[in-house]
Amino acid sequence: MYQGELNFDGLIGPTHNYSGLSEGNIASSKNSKKTSNPKKAALQGLKKMKLLIEMGIPQGIFLPHERPSLSFLRTQGFSGSDADIVGSAAKISSLLLNQSYSASSMWAANAATFSPSVDCQDAIAHITPANLFSMQHRRIEANFTYQQLNLIFKSSHFKIHKPIESTDLMSDEGAANHLRITNSHLKRGIHVFVYGRDTSKESLNFVARQSRAASEYIANSHKLDMKQTFFLKQNMKAINRGSFHNDIVSLATENVFIFHEEAFEDSKHKIQKIKNSLKVQENNFFIEISKNDIPLDILVNSYLLNSQLVRNSSGDMTFIMPTEVNNYSECKEWLKWVKENTPIKDFKYVDIKQSMMNGGGPACLRFKIVVNKDEFNNINPNFLLNPDLIKKLEALINNSYRDNLEIKDLSDPELINESYTILDNLTQIFKTGSIYSFQKE
Ligand code: SUG
Protein backbone atom coordinates (compact mmCIF):
# COMPACT_ATOMS: atom_id res chain seq x y z
CA MET A 1 0.00 0.00 0.00
CA TYR A 2 1.54 3.24 -1.13
CA GLN A 3 1.02 6.91 -0.45
CA GLY A 4 2.94 9.94 -1.67
CA GLU A 5 4.24 11.12 -5.03
CA LEU A 6 3.32 9.25 -8.17
CA ASN A 7 4.15 10.27 -11.72
CA PHE A 8 2.41 9.45 -14.98
CA ASP A 9 4.74 9.72 -17.96
CA GLY A 10 3.51 9.92 -21.52
CA LEU A 11 4.63 6.84 -23.45
CA ILE A 12 6.36 8.30 -26.50
CA GLY A 13 4.35 7.44 -29.59
CA PRO A 14 5.52 5.91 -32.89
CA THR A 15 5.24 9.17 -34.86
CA HIS A 16 7.66 11.23 -32.73
CA ASN A 17 9.17 13.73 -35.16
CA TYR A 18 10.78 17.14 -35.46
CA SER A 19 8.56 19.46 -37.44
CA GLY A 20 9.28 22.69 -35.56
CA LEU A 21 5.70 23.33 -34.51
CA SER A 22 6.29 25.19 -31.26
CA GLU A 23 7.15 28.83 -31.71
CA GLY A 24 8.99 30.16 -28.68
CA ASN A 25 10.38 26.72 -27.89
CA ILE A 26 14.00 27.14 -28.91
CA ALA A 27 14.84 23.42 -29.20
CA SER A 28 11.77 22.72 -31.36
CA SER A 29 12.73 25.51 -33.78
CA LYS A 30 16.43 24.64 -33.81
CA ASN A 31 15.87 20.97 -34.60
CA SER A 32 13.08 21.49 -37.08
CA LYS A 33 13.14 19.00 -39.99
CA LYS A 34 15.86 16.84 -38.45
CA THR A 35 15.43 13.05 -38.58
CA SER A 36 13.94 11.59 -35.39
CA ASN A 37 14.31 8.13 -33.88
CA PRO A 38 10.94 7.15 -32.36
CA LYS A 39 12.29 3.79 -31.12
CA LYS A 40 15.15 5.43 -29.23
CA ALA A 41 12.82 8.14 -27.92
CA ALA A 42 10.34 5.64 -26.47
CA LEU A 43 13.09 3.49 -24.93
CA GLN A 44 14.74 6.57 -23.38
CA GLY A 45 11.40 7.60 -21.87
CA LEU A 46 10.80 4.11 -20.50
CA LYS A 47 14.27 3.99 -18.95
CA LYS A 48 13.54 7.18 -17.03
CA MET A 49 10.30 5.61 -15.72
CA LYS A 50 12.24 2.52 -14.63
CA LEU A 51 14.63 4.69 -12.66
CA LEU A 52 11.76 6.07 -10.58
CA ILE A 53 10.52 2.55 -9.86
CA GLU A 54 14.02 1.52 -8.78
CA MET A 55 13.89 4.40 -6.32
CA GLY A 56 10.67 3.02 -4.82
CA ILE A 57 8.35 5.57 -6.43
CA PRO A 58 5.49 3.91 -8.34
CA GLN A 59 5.19 4.97 -11.93
CA GLY A 60 2.12 5.43 -14.05
CA ILE A 61 1.89 5.77 -17.79
CA PHE A 62 -0.37 7.55 -20.29
CA LEU A 63 -0.98 5.98 -23.69
CA PRO A 64 -0.01 7.96 -26.80
CA HIS A 65 -2.81 9.80 -28.59
CA GLU A 66 -4.15 8.72 -31.98
CA ARG A 67 -1.75 10.07 -34.60
CA PRO A 68 -2.25 10.94 -37.33
CA SER A 69 -5.39 12.58 -36.06
CA LEU A 70 -7.59 12.15 -39.11
CA SER A 71 -10.54 13.63 -37.25
CA PHE A 72 -8.50 16.85 -36.89
CA LEU A 73 -7.70 16.82 -40.62
CA ARG A 74 -11.40 16.26 -41.37
CA THR A 75 -12.27 19.40 -39.36
CA GLN A 76 -9.80 21.23 -41.63
CA GLY A 77 -11.80 20.24 -44.72
CA PHE A 78 -10.03 17.05 -45.88
CA SER A 79 -12.18 14.05 -46.77
CA GLY A 80 -12.19 10.62 -48.38
CA SER A 81 -10.31 7.47 -47.34
CA ASP A 82 -7.54 7.66 -44.73
CA ALA A 83 -4.92 7.69 -47.49
CA ASP A 84 -6.87 10.39 -49.40
CA ILE A 85 -6.96 12.62 -46.34
CA VAL A 86 -3.23 12.36 -45.69
CA GLY A 87 -2.43 12.59 -49.41
CA SER A 88 -4.37 15.81 -49.94
CA ALA A 89 -3.12 17.35 -46.69
CA ALA A 90 0.45 16.61 -47.83
CA LYS A 91 -0.23 18.44 -51.11
CA ILE A 92 -2.15 21.41 -49.69
CA SER A 93 -0.80 22.06 -46.21
CA SER A 94 2.20 20.30 -44.78
CA LEU A 95 1.67 22.36 -41.61
CA LEU A 96 -1.73 20.76 -40.96
CA LEU A 97 -0.33 17.32 -41.78
CA ASN A 98 2.55 17.82 -39.36
CA GLN A 99 0.16 19.00 -36.66
CA SER A 100 -1.97 15.89 -37.11
CA TYR A 101 1.13 13.74 -36.64
CA SER A 102 2.70 15.37 -33.58
CA ALA A 103 3.55 13.01 -30.73
CA SER A 104 3.40 15.94 -28.31
CA SER A 105 1.12 14.13 -25.82
CA MET A 106 4.37 12.61 -24.47
CA TRP A 107 4.86 15.81 -22.44
CA ALA A 108 2.46 14.85 -19.69
CA ALA A 109 3.26 17.91 -17.56
CA ASN A 110 0.94 19.67 -20.00
CA ALA A 111 -1.81 17.06 -19.74
CA ALA A 112 -3.61 18.51 -16.73
CA THR A 113 -3.44 20.34 -13.40
CA PHE A 114 -3.74 18.32 -10.20
CA SER A 115 -4.78 19.36 -6.68
CA PRO A 116 -4.47 16.79 -3.87
CA SER A 117 -7.54 16.12 -1.74
CA VAL A 118 -5.85 17.45 1.41
CA ASP A 119 -5.82 20.96 -0.13
CA CYS A 120 -9.34 20.96 -1.58
CA GLN A 121 -12.25 22.18 0.49
CA ASP A 122 -14.43 19.23 -0.56
CA ALA A 123 -11.62 16.77 0.40
CA ILE A 124 -11.52 15.16 -3.03
CA ALA A 125 -8.61 15.28 -5.48
CA HIS A 126 -9.30 17.49 -8.53
CA ILE A 127 -7.85 17.16 -12.03
CA THR A 128 -8.44 19.52 -14.97
CA PRO A 129 -7.11 18.53 -18.41
CA ALA A 130 -5.31 21.39 -20.14
CA ASN A 131 -7.00 22.87 -23.21
CA LEU A 132 -3.57 23.74 -24.70
CA PHE A 133 -5.25 26.47 -26.69
CA SER A 134 -2.05 28.31 -27.70
CA MET A 135 -0.63 25.68 -30.04
CA GLN A 136 -2.81 24.00 -32.64
CA HIS A 137 -0.89 20.70 -32.57
CA ARG A 138 -1.39 20.51 -28.79
CA ARG A 139 -4.98 21.77 -28.67
CA ILE A 140 -6.10 18.48 -30.22
CA GLU A 141 -4.83 16.59 -27.14
CA ALA A 142 -7.46 17.84 -24.69
CA ASN A 143 -10.37 15.51 -25.47
CA PHE A 144 -8.41 12.29 -25.43
CA THR A 145 -6.62 13.37 -22.26
CA TYR A 146 -10.02 13.83 -20.62
CA GLN A 147 -11.10 10.34 -21.74
CA GLN A 148 -7.88 8.75 -20.58
CA LEU A 149 -7.97 10.43 -17.15
CA ASN A 150 -11.46 8.99 -16.72
CA LEU A 151 -10.13 5.52 -17.53
CA ILE A 152 -7.36 5.81 -14.95
CA PHE A 153 -8.87 7.65 -11.98
CA LYS A 154 -12.05 6.37 -10.31
CA SER A 155 -14.69 9.06 -10.04
CA SER A 156 -15.43 8.15 -6.41
CA HIS A 157 -12.00 9.49 -5.41
CA PHE A 158 -11.02 11.92 -8.14
CA LYS A 159 -13.04 14.71 -9.70
CA ILE A 160 -12.06 14.95 -13.37
CA HIS A 161 -13.19 18.28 -14.77
CA LYS A 162 -13.77 18.95 -18.46
CA PRO A 163 -10.98 20.99 -20.10
CA ILE A 164 -11.71 24.72 -19.82
CA GLU A 165 -13.57 25.95 -22.88
CA SER A 166 -10.91 27.05 -25.35
CA THR A 167 -10.62 30.76 -25.95
CA ASP A 168 -7.64 33.05 -26.23
CA LEU A 169 -8.19 34.45 -22.76
CA MET A 170 -8.67 31.02 -21.19
CA SER A 171 -5.58 29.30 -22.40
CA ASP A 172 -4.28 26.59 -20.08
CA GLU A 173 -1.10 24.48 -20.27
CA GLY A 174 -1.56 22.34 -17.18
CA ALA A 175 0.86 21.43 -14.42
CA ALA A 176 3.87 22.94 -16.19
CA ASN A 177 2.73 26.29 -14.79
CA HIS A 178 1.74 25.18 -11.33
CA LEU A 179 3.78 24.61 -8.16
CA ARG A 180 2.87 23.23 -4.76
CA ILE A 181 4.90 23.86 -1.61
CA THR A 182 4.29 21.86 1.55
CA ASN A 183 6.19 20.39 4.48
CA SER A 184 5.39 16.93 3.32
CA HIS A 185 3.39 15.57 0.38
CA LEU A 186 0.28 14.62 2.34
CA LYS A 187 0.14 17.74 4.51
CA ARG A 188 -1.75 20.84 3.42
CA GLY A 189 0.18 22.90 0.93
CA ILE A 190 0.18 26.23 -0.80
CA HIS A 191 -0.38 26.59 -4.52
CA VAL A 192 1.43 28.86 -6.92
CA PHE A 193 -0.06 29.32 -10.38
CA VAL A 194 2.26 30.97 -12.87
CA TYR A 195 0.74 32.72 -15.86
CA GLY A 196 2.14 34.53 -18.87
CA ARG A 197 -0.55 37.04 -19.58
CA ASP A 198 -3.62 38.67 -18.15
CA THR A 199 -4.82 40.44 -21.27
CA SER A 200 -4.78 39.30 -24.86
CA LYS A 201 -2.08 41.86 -25.68
CA GLU A 202 1.44 41.60 -24.32
CA SER A 203 4.57 42.89 -25.99
CA LEU A 204 6.32 39.60 -26.45
CA ASN A 205 8.37 37.96 -29.15
CA PHE A 206 6.51 34.71 -28.49
CA VAL A 207 3.06 33.74 -27.29
CA ALA A 208 2.55 33.67 -23.51
CA ARG A 209 0.78 30.34 -23.30
CA GLN A 210 -0.85 30.40 -19.89
CA SER A 211 -3.51 33.01 -19.12
CA ARG A 212 -4.22 34.26 -15.62
CA ALA A 213 -7.97 33.79 -16.07
CA ALA A 214 -7.49 30.07 -16.77
CA SER A 215 -5.30 29.66 -13.66
CA GLU A 216 -7.93 31.43 -11.54
CA TYR A 217 -10.68 29.27 -12.98
CA ILE A 218 -8.79 26.10 -12.01
CA ALA A 219 -7.95 27.30 -8.49
CA ASN A 220 -11.62 28.11 -7.93
CA SER A 221 -13.09 24.96 -9.46
CA HIS A 222 -10.60 22.80 -7.52
CA LYS A 223 -11.93 24.46 -4.36
CA LEU A 224 -8.50 25.55 -3.18
CA ASP A 225 -8.17 27.84 -0.18
CA MET A 226 -7.60 31.23 -1.82
CA LYS A 227 -5.59 32.43 1.18
CA GLN A 228 -3.09 29.71 0.37
CA THR A 229 -3.12 30.26 -3.39
CA PHE A 230 -0.89 32.68 -5.30
CA PHE A 231 -0.76 33.90 -8.87
CA LEU A 232 2.64 34.92 -10.17
CA LYS A 233 3.32 36.42 -13.54
CA GLN A 234 6.15 35.01 -15.64
CA ASN A 235 8.89 37.53 -16.32
CA MET A 236 8.55 38.64 -19.96
CA LYS A 237 12.30 38.33 -20.31
CA ALA A 238 12.08 34.63 -19.41
CA ILE A 239 9.42 34.00 -22.07
CA ASN A 240 11.38 35.92 -24.68
CA ARG A 241 14.48 33.85 -23.88
CA GLY A 242 12.64 30.56 -24.43
CA SER A 243 10.97 29.72 -21.13
CA PHE A 244 7.65 28.96 -22.83
CA HIS A 245 6.52 27.13 -19.69
CA ASN A 246 7.42 28.10 -16.15
CA ASP A 247 8.85 24.63 -15.38
CA ILE A 248 12.02 25.61 -17.23
CA VAL A 249 12.90 28.34 -14.72
CA SER A 250 11.44 27.09 -11.42
CA LEU A 251 10.42 23.91 -9.63
CA ALA A 252 9.03 22.81 -6.25
CA THR A 253 8.80 19.55 -4.35
CA GLU A 254 7.59 19.48 -0.75
CA ASN A 255 9.56 22.13 1.18
CA VAL A 256 12.06 22.96 -1.58
CA PHE A 257 11.26 25.73 -4.05
CA ILE A 258 13.94 26.66 -6.60
CA PHE A 259 13.53 29.59 -8.97
CA HIS A 260 15.66 31.82 -11.13
CA GLU A 261 15.99 35.48 -10.21
CA GLU A 262 14.37 36.38 -13.55
CA ALA A 263 11.60 33.77 -13.51
CA PHE A 264 8.82 36.01 -12.20
CA GLU A 265 7.74 39.60 -12.45
CA ASP A 266 7.99 41.61 -9.21
CA SER A 267 9.74 38.55 -7.82
CA LYS A 268 11.13 39.81 -4.46
CA HIS A 269 7.79 41.11 -3.27
CA LYS A 270 5.75 38.12 -4.50
CA ILE A 271 8.13 35.54 -3.06
CA GLN A 272 8.13 37.32 0.31
CA LYS A 273 4.33 37.11 0.36
CA ILE A 274 4.49 33.36 -0.25
CA LYS A 275 7.11 32.95 2.49
CA ASN A 276 4.97 34.88 4.96
CA SER A 277 2.02 32.60 4.35
CA LEU A 278 3.92 29.44 5.29
CA LYS A 279 2.88 28.15 8.68
CA VAL A 280 6.16 26.42 9.51
CA GLN A 281 8.83 28.85 8.35
CA GLU A 282 12.10 27.28 9.37
CA ASN A 283 11.98 24.02 7.38
CA ASN A 284 11.61 25.62 3.99
CA PHE A 285 14.27 25.99 1.36
CA PHE A 286 13.55 28.87 -1.00
CA ILE A 287 16.49 28.75 -3.37
CA GLU A 288 16.93 31.67 -5.74
CA ILE A 289 19.41 31.22 -8.59
CA SER A 290 21.06 34.52 -9.33
CA LYS A 291 21.64 35.57 -12.92
CA ASN A 292 25.32 36.01 -12.06
CA ASP A 293 25.63 32.37 -11.11
CA ILE A 294 23.54 31.00 -13.97
CA PRO A 295 22.39 33.39 -16.69
CA LEU A 296 18.87 32.81 -18.01
CA ASP A 297 20.13 31.57 -21.39
CA ILE A 298 22.20 28.84 -19.75
CA LEU A 299 19.32 27.82 -17.54
CA VAL A 300 17.07 27.49 -20.60
CA ASN A 301 19.66 25.66 -22.71
CA SER A 302 20.66 23.22 -19.96
CA TYR A 303 17.11 22.53 -18.71
CA LEU A 304 18.64 22.34 -15.21
CA LEU A 305 15.32 23.14 -13.53
CA ASN A 306 13.21 20.99 -15.82
CA SER A 307 14.25 18.16 -13.56
CA GLN A 308 12.44 15.83 -11.20
CA LEU A 309 13.14 16.47 -7.54
CA VAL A 310 12.03 13.51 -5.45
CA ARG A 311 12.24 12.43 -1.81
CA ASN A 312 14.38 9.28 -1.69
CA SER A 313 14.30 6.34 0.70
CA SER A 314 17.05 7.80 2.90
CA GLY A 315 14.91 10.88 3.50
CA ASP A 316 17.10 13.22 1.41
CA MET A 317 16.22 14.42 -2.04
CA THR A 318 17.36 13.18 -5.43
CA PHE A 319 17.61 15.55 -8.38
CA ILE A 320 16.97 13.78 -11.70
CA MET A 321 18.39 15.95 -14.47
CA PRO A 322 18.93 15.70 -18.22
CA THR A 323 22.54 14.75 -19.17
CA GLU A 324 22.77 18.08 -21.03
CA VAL A 325 23.30 19.80 -17.63
CA ASN A 326 26.85 18.35 -17.62
CA ASN A 327 27.78 20.62 -20.52
CA TYR A 328 27.54 23.75 -18.38
CA SER A 329 30.19 24.56 -15.76
CA GLU A 330 27.85 27.16 -14.20
CA CYS A 331 25.29 24.43 -13.46
CA LYS A 332 27.94 22.12 -12.02
CA GLU A 333 29.24 24.86 -9.71
CA TRP A 334 25.70 25.61 -8.52
CA LEU A 335 25.02 21.90 -7.93
CA LYS A 336 28.09 21.72 -5.67
CA TRP A 337 26.62 24.50 -3.57
CA VAL A 338 23.22 22.76 -3.53
CA LYS A 339 24.70 19.54 -2.20
CA GLU A 340 26.40 21.33 0.67
CA ASN A 341 23.54 23.61 1.65
CA THR A 342 20.21 21.94 0.94
CA PRO A 343 18.48 18.56 1.45
CA ILE A 344 19.30 17.68 -2.19
CA LYS A 345 22.17 15.23 -1.78
CA ASP A 346 21.89 12.87 -4.71
CA PHE A 347 22.16 13.67 -8.43
CA LYS A 348 21.05 11.41 -11.26
CA TYR A 349 21.23 12.13 -14.99
CA VAL A 350 18.94 10.72 -17.65
CA ASP A 351 19.52 10.56 -21.39
CA ILE A 352 16.27 11.69 -22.99
CA LYS A 353 17.88 13.52 -25.90
CA GLN A 354 15.12 12.62 -28.38
CA SER A 355 12.58 14.48 -26.23
CA MET A 356 15.00 17.27 -25.31
CA MET A 357 15.44 18.07 -29.01
CA ASN A 358 11.77 19.09 -28.99
CA GLY A 359 12.10 21.06 -25.75
CA GLY A 360 10.91 18.34 -23.35
CA GLY A 361 13.04 17.57 -20.28
CA PRO A 362 12.49 15.05 -17.46
CA ALA A 363 9.83 17.19 -15.77
CA CYS A 364 7.94 17.81 -19.04
CA LEU A 365 7.53 14.08 -19.57
CA ARG A 366 5.65 13.51 -16.32
CA PHE A 367 2.35 14.45 -14.70
CA LYS A 368 3.02 14.52 -10.96
CA ILE A 369 0.30 13.71 -8.46
CA VAL A 370 0.17 13.07 -4.72
CA VAL A 371 -2.16 10.43 -3.30
CA ASN A 372 -3.10 8.86 0.01
CA LYS A 373 -3.44 5.08 0.35
CA ASP A 374 -7.13 5.02 -0.40
CA GLU A 375 -6.69 7.13 -3.53
CA PHE A 376 -3.77 4.99 -4.69
CA ASN A 377 -6.06 1.96 -4.51
CA ASN A 378 -8.57 3.75 -6.71
CA ILE A 379 -6.21 4.17 -9.64
CA ASN A 380 -6.61 1.69 -12.51
CA PRO A 381 -3.65 -0.68 -11.92
CA ASN A 382 -3.38 -1.45 -15.64
CA PHE A 383 -1.82 2.01 -16.04
CA LEU A 384 0.89 1.40 -13.42
CA LEU A 385 4.22 0.06 -14.63
CA ASN A 386 5.46 -3.32 -13.40
CA PRO A 387 8.26 -5.60 -14.67
CA ASP A 388 5.89 -7.59 -16.89
CA LEU A 389 4.41 -4.46 -18.48
CA ILE A 390 7.89 -3.02 -19.02
CA LYS A 391 8.96 -6.18 -20.87
CA LYS A 392 5.87 -6.09 -23.09
CA LEU A 393 6.40 -2.42 -23.91
CA GLU A 394 10.09 -2.89 -24.66
CA ALA A 395 9.27 -5.79 -26.99
CA LEU A 396 6.61 -3.77 -28.83
CA ILE A 397 8.87 -0.75 -29.19
CA ASN A 398 11.86 -2.82 -30.35
CA ASN A 399 9.80 -4.80 -32.85
CA SER A 400 7.50 -2.16 -34.28
CA TYR A 401 8.76 1.41 -33.82
CA ARG A 402 10.86 2.96 -36.60
CA ASP A 403 14.38 4.04 -35.79
CA ASN A 404 14.35 6.74 -38.40
CA LEU A 405 11.54 9.15 -39.26
CA GLU A 406 11.93 12.06 -41.62
CA ILE A 407 9.35 14.79 -42.14
CA LYS A 408 8.74 13.59 -45.71
CA ASP A 409 7.73 10.18 -44.27
CA LEU A 410 4.61 11.78 -42.75
CA SER A 411 3.02 11.84 -46.22
CA ASP A 412 3.58 8.09 -46.66
CA PRO A 413 0.12 6.42 -46.34
CA GLU A 414 1.82 3.29 -44.92
CA LEU A 415 2.62 5.22 -41.75
CA ILE A 416 -1.08 5.59 -40.89
CA ASN A 417 -1.65 1.85 -40.51
CA GLU A 418 1.72 1.27 -38.97
CA SER A 419 0.96 3.78 -36.21
CA TYR A 420 -2.60 2.54 -35.67
CA THR A 421 -1.42 -1.09 -35.45
CA ILE A 422 0.98 -0.15 -32.66
CA LEU A 423 -1.76 1.78 -30.82
CA ASP A 424 -4.10 -1.17 -31.23
CA ASN A 425 -1.44 -3.44 -29.68
CA LEU A 426 -1.08 -1.01 -26.79
CA THR A 427 -4.80 -1.17 -26.03
CA GLN A 428 -4.46 -4.95 -25.83
CA ILE A 429 -1.48 -4.70 -23.49
CA PHE A 430 -3.29 -2.17 -21.29
CA LYS A 431 -6.64 -4.02 -21.57
CA THR A 432 -8.56 -0.84 -22.29
CA GLY A 433 -10.94 -2.10 -24.96
CA SER A 434 -11.48 0.21 -27.97
CA ILE A 435 -10.48 3.75 -27.08
CA TYR A 436 -9.15 5.15 -30.37
CA SER A 437 -11.55 6.33 -33.04
CA PHE A 438 -10.02 4.07 -35.72
CA GLN A 439 -11.02 1.12 -33.48
CA LYS A 440 -14.62 2.27 -33.32
CA GLU A 441 -15.23 2.88 -37.03
O1 SUG B 1 4.63 22.28 -26.08
N1 SUG B 1 7.19 20.62 -27.80
C1 SUG B 1 6.46 20.83 -26.56
C2 SUG B 1 7.37 20.72 -25.37
C3 SUG B 1 6.61 20.74 -24.08
C4 SUG B 1 7.47 20.88 -22.90
N2 SUG B 1 6.69 20.85 -21.73
C5 SUG B 1 6.99 21.49 -20.56
N3 SUG B 1 7.86 22.45 -20.51
N4 SUG B 1 6.33 21.15 -19.53
C6 SUG B 1 5.76 22.19 -26.56
O2 SUG B 1 6.37 23.15 -27.03
C7 SUG B 1 7.40 20.34 -30.20
C8 SUG B 1 6.61 19.77 -31.33
C9 SUG B 1 7.27 19.91 -32.69
O3 SUG B 1 7.98 20.86 -32.88
O4 SUG B 1 6.99 19.08 -33.52
C10 SUG B 1 6.54 20.51 -28.95
O5 SUG B 1 5.33 20.50 -29.04
Image (cartoon, rainbow, N blue to C red):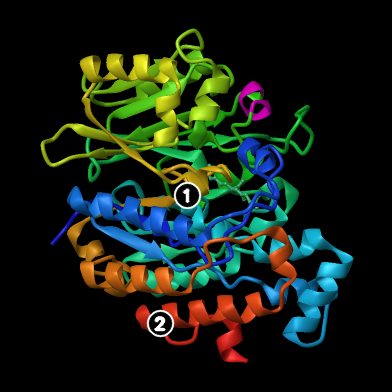
Judge whether residue 240 is colored magenta.
yes
Q: How far from the left and from the top, in percent, is residue 228? A: 39, 34
Question: Toward which corner of the image does residue 187 lie, by quadrant?
Answer: top left
Q: Amino acid at mark 1?
A: Ala
* Whether residue 228 can be seen here: no
Q: What segment is highlighted magenta in the picture?
A: 237-241
Residue highlighted by disc 2? 432
The residue under the point 46% across, 12% down is: 290
Q: Amino acid at mark 2?
A: Thr
- Figure disc tally: 2
Secondary element at image label 1: helix
Return the residue nearer the eye: 218 or 251: 251
Q: How far from the left and from the top, in percent, is residue 114? A: 42, 52
Residue highlighted by disc 1? 109
Furthest residue in direction top, as rendered: 292
The residue under the point 39% across, 25% down is: 258
Alpha carbon of mark 2 to alpha carbon of mark 1: how far?
A: 23 Å
Label 1 Cα crowd, 10 Å radius (few <14 / some 14-19 / many 20+) = many
Label 2 Cα crowd, 10 Å radius (few <14 / some 14-19 / many 20+) = some
Question: Toward which corner of the image does residue 280 lie, by quadrant?
Answer: top left
